[in-house]
C-alpha cells in the first residue's frame, strides 16, 4: 500500500507484516520519483502490475529479448545491447528506484569488458554471423585478447592490423627475393657473354669444328635471353610488388588512427557512465539519510532538504541515462566502423594475395619463355652435332692438306 498512489491491484499479494494484513505493522519507505511515502515491509514482493518492488532474495527479472537495432541489413545481427533504461520493465518511477541497485552490480544479461558491452552468453541467444560460412574478419575479432606475454590485452582490430603489417613485410621480402634473382640473372648473362668470346678450341676443324663454333655462339644468345629475363622481372614483378606495398601502408595507417580514436571515445563515454553512476549512488544515499531524519523528526528543515535531495537524485538519474545514451551512440559508431573497416581490410588482404599470385604466375611464365628461348639457341648445336662424321672430317682434312696420292714402290735393277 502506498500513500498518494492508486489502490493496489488484485495481483499485489500482501504479506504478514503489511498494513493490509490483519495486525500487520508496516514501516515507511521513501524513494519514489513522485515523492510518495510507501508503507512496505521486509518481505515486499514485485508482481506484474504492482507498484511495489521485487523481493531482495530473488534475481532481477529477465529482460525481454534484445531486438537488433535497425541500422542496416548487414549490421542488424550485431547491435550493441540496449541500455537498461530502454527496457519496458525498468521504465518510469520503478526504474529510478531500481537504478542504483542495478548499477551497483553488473546486469545478469550484460558483460562489460574493456569498456565494451557484450551480451552474457548464458542469457543471450546465439547470434547469427554477419557473413556465415565465409570466416570473415567482421565476425571473429570483437573481443580483446591477451598478448603473448599475458601482461596486456590486444584488441581484435589490432590483431587484424598486425596481420596486414605482416603481409606488408612478406610482400617486401618477396620483392627483395625477386631483386636477388634479377642480380643473379644479370651476373649469369654477363658471364655467359664473356665465356662465348673465349678462344679455347678455336682451331678445331671440320664438322666438329662447326658444332663447337655454334655452341660458343649459343652462349652469347643465351646471355641475351637471360638479360631480357632479368629486365622483365624488374618491370613486371619487382616494381609492382613494391608499388602495391606503398599504397597498402598508407591505408593501414589511416584505418589504425580512425578505429583507435573511436575506441578512445568509447572508453571516455564509459568513464562518464561510471562517474554518473557513482554520483547517482551518492544522491540516493543522501536522499535515504534525509528520509530517515524525517522519520525520527531530527530537523524541521528535513522536508525541504528531502525535496532538494530528491531533485538532485532525479537530476543524477537523468545525467546517468544521458551518459548511457551517449555511450551507446559511441559504441554503435565504433561497431559500424569496425564492421566497415574490417571488411575493407579483408578486401585489401584478398587483393594483396591475388596480386602476388598473379605476379608470381608472371614470373613462372617468364621463366618458361626463357627456357624456350634457351632451347632455341641449343637446337642449332644439336643439329650440327648430329651431322658430325669422323669420315667426313677426315675427307675434308685430307683434301686440304694432302701432299700426294702416289705411293712409293720397290727399286728394280
Image (tube, rainbow, N blue to C red):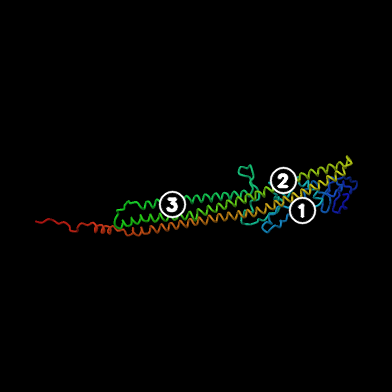
Disc 3 marks which residue? 186
N-term-proximal mark, 3 vs 2: 3
Q: Report how far apart the C-alphas of labels 3 and 2 lie in the structure.
A: 63 Å
Q: Which of the marked residues, 3 or 1, is nearer the chain's N terminus? A: 1
Give the label, 3 or 2, closer to the camera: 3
Label 3 to label 1: alpha-carbon separation:
74 Å
Q: Position of residue 146 (x, y in %)?
A: 63, 45
The numbered disc on residue 271 is 2
**Secondary structure beneath disc 1?**
loop
Q: Quadrant of residue 128?
A: bottom right
Nearer the observer: mark 3 or 1; the answer is 3
The disc label shown at residue 87, or none: 1
Q: Secondary structure at mark 2?
A: helix
Mark 3 vs 1: CB contact within 8 A = no
Tell which of 375 and 133 is nearer to you: 375
Q: Nearer the viewer, residue 224 or 123?
A: 224
Amino acid at each position: 500500500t502506498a500513500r498518494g498512489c492508486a489502490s493496489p491491484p488484485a495481483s499485489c499479494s500482501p504479506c504478514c507484516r503489511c498494513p493490509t494484513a490483519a495486525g500487520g505493522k508496516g514501516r515507511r519507505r521513501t524513494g519514489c520519483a513522485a515523492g510518495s511515502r510507501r508503507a512496505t515491509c521486509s518481505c515486499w514482493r514485485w508482481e506484474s502490475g504492482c507498484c511495489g518492488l521485487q523481493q531482495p532474495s530473488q534475481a532481477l527479472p529477465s529482460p525481454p529479448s534484445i531486438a537488433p537495432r535497425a541500422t542496416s541489413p548487414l549490421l542488424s545481427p550485431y547491435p550493441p545491447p540496449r541500455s537498461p533504461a530502454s527496457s519496458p520493465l525498468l521504465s518510469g518511477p520503478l526504474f529510478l528506484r531500481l537504478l542504483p541497485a542495478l548499477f551497483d552490480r553488473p546486469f545478469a544479461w550484460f558483460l562489460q569488458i574493456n569498456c565494451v558491452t557484450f551480451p552474457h552468453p548464458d542469457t543471450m541467444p546465439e547470434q547469427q554471423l554477419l557473413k556465415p560460412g565465409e570466416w570473415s574478419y567482421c565476425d571473429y575479432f570483437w573481443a580483446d585478447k591477451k598478448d603473448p606475454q599475458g601482461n596486456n590485452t590486444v584488441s581484435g582490430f589490432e590483431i587484424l592490423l598486425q596481420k596486414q603489417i605482416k603481409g606488408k613485410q612478406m610482400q617486401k621480402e618477396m620483392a627483395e627475393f625477386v631483386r636477388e634473382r634479377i642480380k643473379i640473372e644479370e651476373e649469369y648473362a654477363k658471364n655467359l657473354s664473356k665465356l662465348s668470346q673465349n678462344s679455347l678450341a678455336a682451331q678445331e676443324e671440320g664438322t666438329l669444328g662447326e658444332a663447337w663454333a655454334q655452341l660458343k655462339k649459343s652462349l652469347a644468345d643465351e646471355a641475351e635471353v637471360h638479360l631480357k629475363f632479368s629486365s622483365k622481372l624488374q618491370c613486371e614483378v619487382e616494381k609492382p610488388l613494391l608499388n602495391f606495398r606503398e599504397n597498402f601502408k598508407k591505408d593501414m595507417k589511416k584505418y589504425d588512427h580512425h578505429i583507435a580514436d573511436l575506441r578512445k571515445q568509447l572508453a571516455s563515454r564509459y568513464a562518464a557512465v561510471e562517474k554518473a553512476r557513482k554520483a547517482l549512488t551518492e544522491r540516493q544515499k543522501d536522499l535515504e539519510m534525509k528520509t530517515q531524519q524525517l522519520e525520527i523528526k531530527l530537523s524541521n528543515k528535513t522536508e525541504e532538504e528531502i525535496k532538494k535531495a530528491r531533485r538532485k537524485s532525479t537530476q543524477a538519474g537523468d545525467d546517468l541515462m544521458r551518459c548511457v545514451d551517449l555511450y551507446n551512440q559511441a559504441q554503435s559508431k565504433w561497431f559500424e566502423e569496425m564492421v566497415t573497416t574490417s571488411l575493407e581490410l579483408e578486401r585489401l588482404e584478398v587483393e594483396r594475395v591475388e596480386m602476388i599470385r598473379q605476379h608470381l604466375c608472371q614470373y613462372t611464365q617468364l621463366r618458361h619463355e626463357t627456357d624456350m628461348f634457351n632451347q632455341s639457341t641449343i637446337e642449332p648445336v644439336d643439329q650440327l652435332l648430329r651431322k658430325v662424321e669422323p669420315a667426313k672430317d677426315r675427307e675434308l682434312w685430307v683434301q686440304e692438306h694432302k701432299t700426294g696420292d702416289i705411293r712409293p714402290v720397290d727399286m728394280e735393277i
